[in-house]
Amino acid sequence: MRKIGIKFNFFILILTFGFLPQISSAQTLTEQKDPIIVASEKLVYSNPIESIKIALQLSKSENNSIKSEAKINYVLSQAYFIKGDYSTSLKLLFEGKNYTSYLTEKEKIDIAITKIAILRDLSLDKESKKRIDLLELSTQKIANLKWGSYTQKIIVLEKAKLLLKEHQYSKGVELLLAQEQNSKQLFEAFPELELSYAITLGEFYLEQKNLTDAKKQFSIALSIINQQNNINKYAKIQVLLGLAAIHFFQKEHDVVTTILNSAFVDSQNLQNVFLQEKIIQQQNVNYLALNDASKYKLTNANFIQIKANIEVLEQEAVNAAYNLITKEYSDTFAEKKKQYDTVFNYISVLILLLSIVSIFFWVKFTQRIKNLTELDNYLQISKKKIIDLYSEKRQEPKKAIILKETEEQLLIKLKKFENSKRFVNKDISLALLAGQLDTNTKYLSEIINSHYHVNFNTYINRLRINYITEKLKTDPNYIKYRISYLAENCGFASHSSFATVFKSITGISPVKFIDFLKSEKTNSLE
């Protein structure tokens, strides 16, 4: 990849300093760069980092035409999305409205779909669905039958992906299969559409535990990918995740390890932490099934670190989304207001003749102002809450100064506490434990933070989860108990809080953990 980057940079230097003096004055610098823009676009799904470098280099030129700027903006928005940089991608996607007249029909559709995908990934499902509906309405304005059909298929795929997220698997499979019969010609014209279709359908079958059909769809997707000149690594990772899950259910754990290692290498090339999280989560589950504690410990540490990074990236992306959506509504409001102002001024001249019409427009105008203002206020409040929450998380408490002797005594007492079962007490708190250990909350909190690198709640939760996992492994009766009983037994107040904490610490849900133990027990008996 580094060699490719050097070649492209060298090509740019030649174009800029070598050929320019020799070309006709009628030929612009922008026209010289068109092949490089195309090359950058081809790298989006195989090497987004290189694609971004090339596009950013091209964007620095002062001689770019608006058409070239539109193309560069489009390529960058797609490359940052594949890289997993949702904040930057969203900013570029929303800037795309400034270049609408200079984009192809496919580029306009891709921009709309990428917005929908990012909003869905950020769990802004309501806004995502709204934009699907708007895109569906816009298909009525597409005169070209080919692009109209393409857009309709894309919309069906996005609706299916929302159904997948909502666990409506049967409905999603039915929706996709209904499109299969009349899609052959469209799939031949747009292999990437067939690729997305096969991956999505494969994911539905996988959720239904229909491993045969799932494997068939992922094999079709892999065949399409292997026929490409520039391998779509983003799609390939999704396929590998699906195949790894199939082999896992078939208890072919060594095969799973090989597939996930390959997928992780590709995800590092893309630098997409969202894909890395999915891969590492599957690795955790697979190492648990293999009872490989050392590798599980290593991957779980990576999982916790990546998850922390993702939380920051998601908060930044949600922040950016709210800002951009708010601005979009504000711009729409300003545009509408300007239009209505013009109408109102015209009506005021003819007020004596058109009083009824003027009243109608005024009522409609004020109602629109009210609706858009309420929406604007809502988005501003939501944005403020997110910013405040993010700011609170970044505030670091002041450290207390503790004597070395006191610190050592507290550590000894904590070890005794850990060896007891007092942490399963639902009423345990920082103040209560501090009292039991003959210290104050400030000292106790500082000791836990400095030696365990977590806060008090996380410290207690880890003790509880470690306790219950050991019980599940060593006491066969515990596997038979309800999740609610397990939660109560280790000190959690509710089923839901236990399940959330269990998954955040182990990387899997308690139900899946118990299933793995049962499966391993069955294998050992065989």
Image (tube, grey):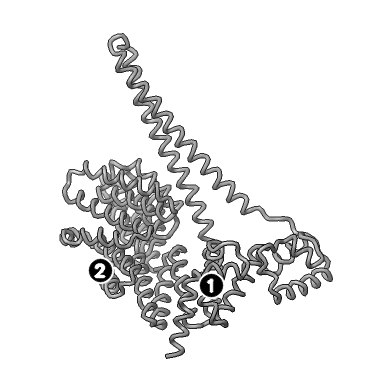
Q: Is residue 277 visible?
A: yes
Query: Residue at point 51% right, 39% down?
Result: 380
SS for dot 1: helix
The quarter of the displayed image where residue 398 is located: bottom right
Q: Nearer the viewer, residue 473 or 6?
A: 473
Name the foreground residue: 357 vs 300.
357
Which of the 4 quarters of the picture holds residue 340?
Answer: top left
In front of the other: 456 or 343: 456
Residue 491 percent location from the top left of the image: 63, 67
**Horizontal and vertical percent for residue 493?**
60, 62
Write down the residue under mark 1.
Answer: 300
Secondary structure under the numbered disc 2 in the rendered image: helix
The residue to which callout 2 is attached is 224
| Mark pair 1, 2: CA separation | 33 Å
Q: Is residue 305 visible in the rendered structure shown here?
A: no
Residue type beneath disc 1: Asn
Q: Residue at x 57, y 76 (%)?
A: 469
Residue at 36% from the left image edge and 57% from the top image edge: 12
Whether residue 243 sits left or right of residue 512 in the image: it is left
Against 475, residue 52 (above or below) is above
Q: Report the amino acid beneath label 2.
A: Ile
Question: In the image, 5: left or right of 471?
Answer: left
Give the left or right position of residue 265, taking residue 110 as reference: right
Residue drawn at x 39%, y 59% is: 82
